[in-house]
Amino acid sequence: MSKSDAENFSSLATLLVEAGRDFYRRGWVMGTSGNFSAVASREPLRLAITASGMDKGRLAEENILQIDEGGNVIAGEGRPSDETLLHLTVARVREAGAVLHTHSVWSTILSEAMGDEGGFAIEGYEMLKGLSNVRTHLHREWLPVIENSQDMTALARVVEDALARHKDAHAFLLRGHGLYTWGRDLKEARRHTEILEFLLEVTGRTRK
């Protein structure tokens, strides 16, 4: 790893640690739940990603690994998240610069409640304008709900298909599991997480 690559990776690791601690304080990644990644290099594809089994409220830079496009660890100690293939899929298909996965109460409740419908729409809220390329509260945001699976290779294919079918979606939910969202960079991905977690709570609280 060159000096510039190492500096870039270190910067991303710091930002991922900050995101983890912030999301833990908000109650979105309790225990060792959740996982976060950021693109360190596009060609070849390299991700900075949280190691598996880490308490997000106590993350440190040494808990951030660098992986290649096959999910193999090329820098750092530990094992990458079990859901690494999902991060790689979103980064590739959406050309995302960062992918963030939370396990909040409301994302879990709604993903289960709306799972049989295959997703649900959120519309009419001013906060929708916090999502990239959304200019009006009249926007209708469709959140696909994908059946969860422990077969990550198969699940990654389902996620890729859902992203192809819902090209304007800013996120998806894994049923009984939580929220996946992304952005052009970590700043945008964190904003999307905040916006969507707010909207999920509003939707859950007002749903009849």
Image (spheres, rainbow, N blue to C red):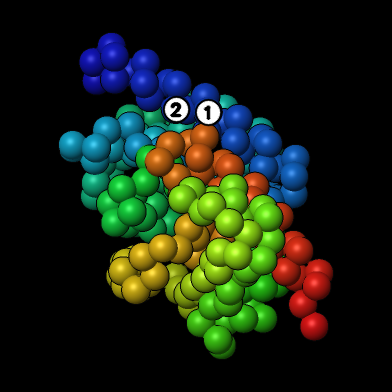
Circle 1 sits on which residue? Answer: 15
Image quadrant of residue 128?
bottom right
Provide residue 186's location: percent of width, then percent of height.
48, 36
Residue at the extreme left: 43
Q: Quadrant of the N terminus?
A: top left
Q: Is residue 50 left or right of residue 73?
A: right
Q: How many marks?
A: 2
Q: Quadrant of the C terminus?
A: bottom right
Q: Which mark is residue 12?
A: 2
Q: Label 2 amino acid?
A: Leu
- Which of the two residues, 207 or 27, is positioned nearer the viewer here? 207
Provide residue 40's location: percent of width, then percent of height.
33, 32
Provide residue 157's location: percent of width, then percent of height.
30, 70
Image quadrant of residue 12?
top left
Q: What residue is rendered at 57% in x and 60% in y?
A: 179
User: Does residue 9 appear in this view?
Assistant: yes
Q: Is residue 28 above or below residue 56?
A: below
Secondary structure beneath dot 1 equals helix
- Which of the two residues, 34 or 184, is positioned nearer the viewer here? 184
Q: What residue is rendered at 27% in x and 33% in y?
A: 41
Q: What residue is rendered at 67% in x and 81% in y?
A: 113
Q: Is residue 46 left or right of residue 193?
A: left
Residue at the extreme top: 3
Q: Label 1 amino acid?
A: Leu
Q: Residues within 10 Å of mark 2 (few under 14, many from 20)?
A: many
Q: Are marks 1 and 2 in contact (CB under 8 Å)?
A: yes
Secondary structure beneath dot 2 equals helix
Q: What residue is rendered at 69% in x and 61% in y?
A: 125
